[in-house]
Amino acid sequence: MRKVRKAVFPVAGLGTRFLPATKAVPKEMLTVVDRPVIQYVVDEAREAGIEHFIFVTGRNKAVIEDHFDIQFELYDTLEQRGKKSQLDMLRAMQPVPGQTSFTRQQEPLGLGHAVWCARDLVGNEPFALLLPDMIMQSEESCLKGMVDLYRRTGNNVIGVQECDPEEAHKYGIVAKGAELHTGFQITGMVEKPAKGTAPSNLYINGRYILQPEVFGLLENQERGAGGEIQLTDALQRLGKEQTLFGYHYQGDTFDCGSPEGFVEANIAIALQKPELRSVVESVIARHLGKASDAEA
């Protein structure tokens, strides 16, 4: 069985829900407490044993490449000022030479097209796909659990978790088949089903381990919803040729592609830091009090 060594991060999106902040700053570089969103996602991939990080970028995304590069002036300044802890932290986050690759999605043709743009960098081997908007928090990372399931099955693995059944029409939903190992067989999937028609309340949470055959399907995939090449459409076709497993993730997920999810991520992660917890609790209590007074 081939090891999952590479991960693809589609970071070409415009981030229009965060305008005007994203007019000059990529949404993936917006900061959650003390680091950009993309760093949390890369850290998750690294914890799962990923060795090569592939970024599918677009225009005005060069700062992402700069973030994962060495900034000699900064490192030198920190060293001269004796800020060893900060310097050690930056070095620990720094990919080694040759671990990162960048390619362009030159047209905004959807997630499926962005994945297809990474085909030559991935090559003929299984790969992980992590949507960079989604920050996940749990004792064992979502992708690590998926890699463990992949090692048991040798097949495609899709991360899923539960949503309110009344909200299922907002997501890509899978149909659950027989339970196998620490996951279950996916017998079908549908993108944003009409209310009352969803086969389950298990939604696709933005984490995948896929076999390279998906690239051939994406290459001739017809455009779907929104006139874009949809990954879900290609996965439905892949499921007719290969087994798709679902990994039922039990942790917290923050959708930082939406303002409300971004705010929740900042609050939740700040509360987990001992040096910030009491301050955040005090600030929240104070502003809730002000809001109550204003409503009275």
Image: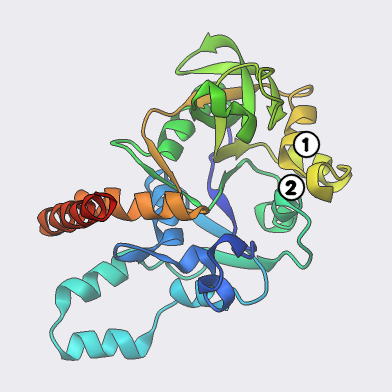
Return the residue nearer the eye: 38 or 255: 255
Q: Position of residue 151 (x, y in %)?
A: 50, 28
Residue corresponding to mark 1: 234
Q: Residues within 10 Å of mark 1 (few under 14, many from 20)?
A: many
Quadrant containing the N terminus in the rendered view:
top right
The answer to whether marks 1 and 2 mark residues whose Cβ atoms lie closer than 8 Å is yes
Q: Is residue 140 visible?
A: yes
Return the residue nearer the eye: 151 or 255: 255
Q: Is residue 202 visible?
A: no
Instruction: Give the mark nearer the N terminus: 1 vs 2.
Output: 2
Residue 221 is left or right of residue 66, and the answer is: right
Q: Quadrant of residue 158?
A: top right
Q: Position of residue 132 (x, y in %)?
A: 52, 54
Alpha carbon distance from label 1 to label 2: 8 Å
**Could you tell me the amino acid type at mark 1?**
Ala
Q: Quadrant of residue 236?
A: top right
Residue corresponding to mark 2: 112
Return the residue nearer the eye: 11 or 152: 11
**Residue at image location 52% in from the left, 12% down from the top:** 180
- Image vertical order of residue 28 relative to residue 114, above or below: below
**Residue at image location 30% in from the left, 62% down from the top:** 33
